[in-house]
Image (tube, rainbow, N blue to C red):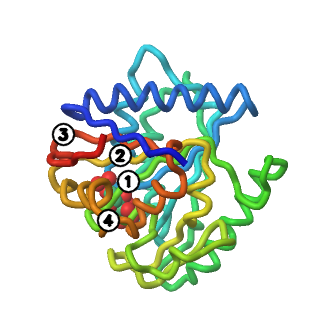
């Protein structure tokens, strides 16, 4: 594996511009290959940046050919303020003009999910859904998403894969549940590290000065090599692209 790519932009507008080119290229490659674009997305600031990158531009995605999955989700109802699905809907999906087509969206949690539900049950249901969506792929041991779009927390977490958590050892499951997330809410469902690393392309978006310590740990320090985001870099190498801004990478010496 060669090294992951780290791109730094002066601000969000330039980042969004470059992310647009990157997503459209991944979309074109996927459509040429299997006439559908299977992408997994996270929560956090990502839905807002995606809207800025992809909506209201001269070149537009073929949203009717998109299958949108979730990199992780909180075990809450789909209309709950903590739901990543709800966030994506509010910030991105609802803003796609009808004439551009509608993506097929595959939420993780059921409509009735609440904090009493067993997140493992939601994880199993989602894994079944992925098995149906990815049947006939080249490598059925793992789904190969065309693109996975991730955030990186100030602790180095990505998806709901947290530093030091035993879930980082998972080798076979596609989707897993945790009930002890250090960041609330505690019950979550997440794609596993092998699934993230198997994707054709993986992008992180990390912006703002609040990320600069963790960016140094990930890119410049031996101590950071066990962090979940570093493990993605290590496992997927040059399939990984980081879209960052100058405040987030201040002092990072990585090439
Ligand atoms: C969560 C959040 C979280 C977020 C990262 C990055 O489930 O707790 O979705 O994983 O994606 O902390 O957040 P930002 O993109 O807002 O920096």
**Res 229 quadrant in image:** bottom left
Quadrant of res 8: top left
Task: Give the residue at x 52% y 26%.
Answer: 24
**Rendered view: 196 above or below 127:** above
Between circles 4 and 2, the one closer to the viewer is 4
> Nearer the N terminus, badge 4 or badge 3?
4
The image quadrant where one finds the C terminus is top left
Q: Name the residue under label 1.
A: 151
Q: Between residues 17 and 244, which one lies in front from this camera angle?
A: 244
Mark 2 touches mark 1? (CB < 8 Å): yes
Figure quarter occupied by ligand 1: bottom left
First of labels 4, 2 by sequence position: 2
- Whether tag 1 and tag 4 are in contact, CB under 8 A, the answer is no
Numbered mark located on residue 246 in the image:
3
Q: From this view, report whether residue 236 is shown above or below residue 179.
A: above
Circle 2 residues within 10 Å: few <14, some 14–19, many ≥20? many
| Ligand 1 contact, mark 1 (Cβ < 8 Å) | yes
Foreground residue among 63 and 98 = 63
Mark 3 neighbour class, 10 Å CA radius: few under 14, some 14 to 19, many 20 or more: some
Q: Residue 107: in sight, yes or no?
A: yes
Residue bearing mark 4 = 222
State how far apart marks 4 and 3 are (Cα): 22 Å
Say which mark, if any, is on residue 205: 2
């Amino acid at each position: 594996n060669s090294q992951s790519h780290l791109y730094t932009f002066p601000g969000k507008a330039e980042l969004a511009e470059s992310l647009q080119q990157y997503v459209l290229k991944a979309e074109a490659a996927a459509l040429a290959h299997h006439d559908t674009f299977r992408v997994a997305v996270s929560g956090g600031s990502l839905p807002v940046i995606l809207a800025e990158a992809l909506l209201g531009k001269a070149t537009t995605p073929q949203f009717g050919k998109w299958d949108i999955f979730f990199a992780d989700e909180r075990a809450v109802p789909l209309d709950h303020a903590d739901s990543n699905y709800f966030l994506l809907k509010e910030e991105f999906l609802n803003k796609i003009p009808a004439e551009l087509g509608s993506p097929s969206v595959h939420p993780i949690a059921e409509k009735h999910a609440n904090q009493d539900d067993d997140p493992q049950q939601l994880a199993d249901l989602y894994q079944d859904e992925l098995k149906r969506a990815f049947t006939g792929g080249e490598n059925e041991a793992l789904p190969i998403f065309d693109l996975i779009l991730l955030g990186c927390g100030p602790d180095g977490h990505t998806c709901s894969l947290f530093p030091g958590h035993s879930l980082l050892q998972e080798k076979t499951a596609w989707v897993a549940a945790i009930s002890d997330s250090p960041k609330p809410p505690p019950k979550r469902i997440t794609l596993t590290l092998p699934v993230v690393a198997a994707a054709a392309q993986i992008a992180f978006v990390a912006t703002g000065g609040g990320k600069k310590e963790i960016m140094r740990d990930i890119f410049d320090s031996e101590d950071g090599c066990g962090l979940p985001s570093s493990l993605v870099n290590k496992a997927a190498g040059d399939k990984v692209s980081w879209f960052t801004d100058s405040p987030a990478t201040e002092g990072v010496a990585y090439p």
